[in-house]
Image (tube, rainbow, N blue to C red):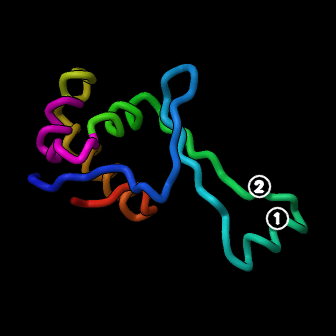
Amino acid sequence: MDSIFFPNPDRPWSRREDGKIVIDVENKGLHHRIAQKIWHKPKVSHISLDAYGTALWEQMDGEHTVYDIVMAMKEQFPGEEDRMLDRVVTFLGTLQTNRFIIKK
């Protein structure tokens, strides 16, 4: 609960006009190049976070602990207080697995 995360500087991200966060992922490697040529797959994928993911992303500034994030998320989404810890930990795990965030 005292772990601190921040966005991976190697993964560019931006904010859409509606305020949602979008993470850009460059599709590299042999398989991706083949898919790009044959099936016209994009060179960059844009991963859009929903309102929940955007709120969590905004809390990851390299200073807030997981506990701080859970408390802030409970405040922003009061109807989901009972399962917020599980949701935050699961989402942080997914972001870390995909190298979107780094543990400080």
For the point 68% across and 76% down, the residue is 29
Residue carrying label 1: 36
For the point 49% across and 23% down, the residue is 19
Image quadrant assignment for residue 28: bottom right
Image quadrant assignment for residue 57: top left
| Residue in the foreground of this view, choosing between 7 and 34 | 7
State yes or no: residue 23 in magenta.
Answer: no
- Residue 67's spot in the image, x, y percent? 12, 43
| Label 1 Cα neighbours within 10 Å, binned few <14 / some 14-19 / many ≥20 | some
Left or right, 30 with reference to 81: right
| Label 2 Cα neighbours within 10 Å, binned few <14 / some 14-19 / many ≥20 | some
Left or right, 81 with reference to 55: left
Amino acid carrying label 2: it is: Pro
Query: Image height check: is 49 above or below 12?
Result: above
Q: Which mark is residue 14?
A: none
| Residue in the foreground of this view, choosing between 97 and 80 | 97
What separation in Å lies between label 2 and label 1 (alpha carbons)?
6 Å
Amino acid carrying label 1: it is: Gln
State yes or no: residue 72 in magenta.
Answer: yes
**At numbered mark 2, what does the secondary structure look like: helix, strand or loop?**
loop
The C terminus lies in quadrant? bottom left
- Chain-order first, disc 2 or disc 1: 1
**At numbered mark 1, what does the secondary structure look like: helix, strand or loop?**
helix
Query: Image height check: is 33 above or below 16?
Result: below
Residue carrying label 2: 42
Magenta range is: 60-73
For the point 81% across and 68% down, the residue is 35
Query: Image height check: is 53 above or below 44?
Result: above
